[in-house]
Image (cartoon, helix red, strand yellow):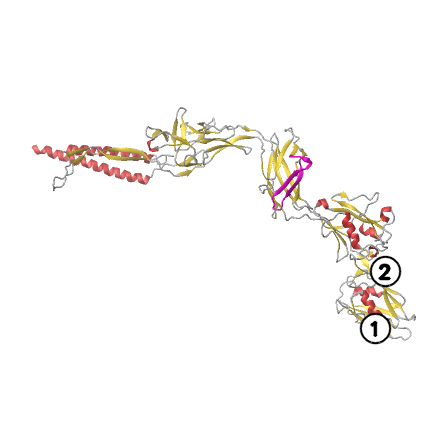
Amino acid sequence: MPARSMFTAVSGLRNEQVNLDVIANNISNTNTMGFKRGRITFEESFSVLLQGASRPPGDQGGVNPLQIGNGSSIGSIDNIFVQGNIQSTGNQTDLALRGDGFFVINNGQRDFYTRAGSFQWDSNGRLVIPFNGMKVQGRIADEGGVVSEGSTIGDIIVPFGIVDIAKPTSVIDFIGNLDADSQPIGNILGSDRIYAREIAGETTDINLLYASGSANLQITGLSSLSTTVTVSSSEGTTGLEKVETYTYTASDAGSASKDFHSLDDLIAEINNDFTATHLSVALDNNGALKFTNTSGVAANTLTVSSVNSVLNKALASANGTVGDKLTDVFSHVAVTTDEIINLRNSVGTDLGLTTADTIYISGRVGGADIDSIAGGLADPYEITVDDGSGESITFGELSLAVESAFDITNFKAVEINGVNGAMMINGDGGTENAIDGLSITTNAAVSGGASLEFDNVFDATVGNWYESQPAEDVIHDASVRVFDSLGNTHTCSLSFTKDVKLPNRWDWSISVPEPAEVSGGYEGTVLFDASGAIEEFTYSQGASSLTFDPKNGASVPVEIVLDFGKIGTTDGITQFSSNSTVIARNQNGYSSGVLDNVVISETGTVTGLYTNGNSLTIAKLVLATFNNPAGLIRAGDNTYDISANSGLPIYGTAGTSINATITPGALEMSNVDVAEEFTNMILAQRSFQANARTIVTSDEIMQETVNLKR
């Protein structure tokens, strides 16, 4: 019947019109944040049974039923909750959901649900949807900022402008390393150049002897096998001239070898050649070469010369008619074995000591006197030149006395410089062992008598002792700002100084700038074990914390525990062979502040930020999921409401009970695919056209049927 086909086509037209309505709604919400596109499904309407089916009779086949459909009807219009794209906005109260769930909002009477997270703070600090005033819901933190699953669900309200009162610092945590390899440096004091009288029988190299008299210079530049000394002498009775030349060598070969290395070697060579005729030479008690006429003839003459200019000048004073003629006085660079009565200053002048003299040693170590001269110093600060056997003590023994007087423990201690004979005093490391005010004098200087040349060289007169190296401590400094009860800041400066004598111990001290006044616990020690872990930490004077008076009206005292780490561990400060890096990791005080900003995390935690740097957890956004989110009813304003088939909401939080994350500063966009919607629109249009064409055809058939009676 044409009428039946016509009504079947009409049902198709109606359905495609609804389909176009759904498509149009999707396209119109292409830029609606959080929008979820709709999808229509069709189903076949009731069919008319023209003939029933029959089973196969005997050897014949069965017959299928004959049915004609009555068109289509709408099966469902579904919401498709697939994820929309995330678009950054930069507005921190815009929240995009990635994953399952809905934001929970409340209109003051009941909850609604949305994926559109364009929220703002209202004048009362509530987080709301700005275009309808619905309030975002969350679990509210307690006074301590703790949110639990049992926390009350309610409006998220941020108390902008509330004051966070100041908290005085009570603990400072330190971390980092103190360098185990670093070593304190001691100061080094040196005297002026020191010589000693050249004595017969000594084998001192002539090179570097000091000649005082005519030359007044140190002999240098003698070259082995090329520097020579020539002795020329004429004997008065015969008038014969005898000339001998001797060569300087690195090692003397004997008294008849015509070579020499020391003055003693040169004397032996000259006597070997000249004593038998008329001339002899010896080293006198002052260290000069003394030429003597042994023939008794007054007309004997002598010329002693050298190709080395300084040595030539030193020997020239013996030239002329022989008669106990003397050269310059010779002195060698002082060594530890020289008796101190033979010592001379930098220009070869005798220091004037005798075995009857007493030497006094005084000075300061780290600014403290080693003793007082008034009343006399006790051994080892007082030492006699007589070694107890009528002989003089040596330069080395005097050095040992200085070492004992200043309690020097390093392996160098007091040395005699091998190049210039100076006494070199190597203080122990660190400024606490720095030596100054050093004075080594004789009894004449102490009793007010005339100073000996010895005193002029070794007493505390400015210029006598030069410091070639100042003392340096191994110091590591760290500083940290702390707070008093009024929120005022004070910079505590902590200094670690490595102990000189105990390699694993460091002394520490802490200071607070004025007007604050430290009253206790401001210094102590920290000791490390062989593995670099902290072994012991102590305050001085039995204190258990740093205390100071801020002197500004705040509560007194400020008490601060210094936490260097747990004993036996390396979780605080350590001592390894690495750069010193100790810093204050944390202190628990702060000034007052005002809550003026809020951040929201990926889990929905709402945190208020104070101007003093503190933060406070205010709430945590609640999310809702449904067993059948497609069963939700659209309630307008991008919101959804529950229905009989959606199931009740299941409340939870992002990242824990609900598989979702929240992206602050972004929004979830519509999940409508315009290309797909245009494709669906074309299909709907073609279907509509086809159904319309069915109606036209049915109408033409009906018209032909009417025309049959004509």
The mark that comes first in sequence, 1 or 2, is: 1
The residue identified by callout 1 is 243
Report whether 215 appears left or right of 10: right
- The picture quadrant where one finds residue 265 is bottom right
- The crowding category of the residue bearing disc 1, from other C-alpha atoms within 10 Å (few below 14, some 14 to 19, many at least 20), is some
Residue 287 sits inside the magenta stretch: no
Observer-nearest of 207 and 153 = 153
Which circle marks residue 286 in the picture? 2
Residue 464 in sight:
no
Label 2: element kind: loop
Residue at left 25%, top 35%? 42
Report whether 485 appears left or right of 160: right
Q: Nearer the viewer, mark 1 or mark 2?
A: 2
Q: Residue furthest left?
A: 710
Q: Position of residue 369 (x, y in %)?
A: 77, 43
Residue 527 sits inside the magenta stretch: yes
- The picture quadrant where one finds residue 192 is bottom right
Circle 2: residue type = Asn
- Compared with 565, 305 (above or below) is below
Circle 1: residue type = Val
**What distance separates the C-alpha of mark 1 from that of mark 2?**
27 Å
Q: Position of residue 323 (x, y in %)?
A: 90, 67
Residue at left 24%, top 34%? 43
Q: Which residue lies furthest to the top in this view?
A: 109
Report whether 139 appears left or right of 321: left
Residue 457 in sight:
yes
- The crowding category of the residue bearing disc 2, from other C-alpha atoms within 10 Å (few below 14, some 14 to 19, many at least 20), is some
Q: Where is residue 574 in the image (x, y as percent from the top left)?
A: 60, 44
The boundaries of the magenta stretch are 521-545
Quarter of the picture containing the N terminus is top left
